[in-house]
Image (cartoon, rainbow, N blue to C red):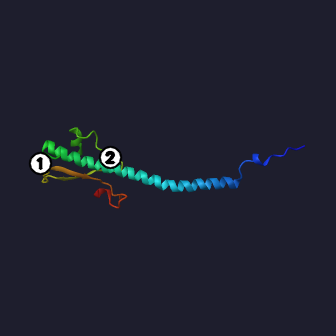
Amino acid sequence: MGRRIQSSCRGFTLIEMMVVLAIIVIMLGMALPIYSASIRRAKEENFRKNLETLNRVIAQYTMDKQKAPKSLQDLQSAKYIAKIPDDITGCNTWEVDEDDSTIMMLYQTEGGIYAVHSGSSRTGSNGKPYSEW
């Protein structure tokens, strides 16, 4: 006599598998934009902190030495920063605002770099180019 297979042991049907996969794809479709936006916000926050740090260190160097740095490497060699941080692009594309006639402090003897900004042409999440931050 042949054995009959009970209906509870048959497994999943193709329709059931397709429904589960469709639900997973929909959930991934909702989660992926949120994840990528959070990554972008984190990168922009890191960029903002690096920019503030560099500009603050330039002012501190100018106050201490009574002259502005001639390059970002001057800040590193004088031990004001351990290394030059990366720009929003992931590499060192900082553009310096330099002027020999700009004096930031009363006793400053010579000009140099007075600020930095990004060399990136991309636009931030706030609608402004990174070079204008």
Residue 75 visible in the snapshot: yes
Q: Is residue 86 left or right of residue 72?
A: right
Residue 71 visible in the snapshot: no
Viewer-proximal residue among 65 and 26? 26
Q: Badge 2: how crowded within 10 Å, few (<14), some, or many (20+)?
A: some
Residue lying furthest right in this view?
1
Viewer-proximal residue among 57 and 3? 3
Residue 79: name its quadrant. Answer: top left
Q: State which quarter of the image contains the C terminus.
A: bottom left
- Please give the label number shown on residue 118: none
Q: Badge 1: how crowded within 10 Å, few (<14), some, or many (20+)?
A: some
List x then y, in percent, for residue 86: 32, 46
- Amino acid under disc 2: Asp
- Amino acid under disc 1: Glu
List x then y, in percent, for residue 96: 23, 52
Viewer-proximal residue among 122 and 108? 108
Pointer 1 residue:
110
Pointer 2 residue:
86
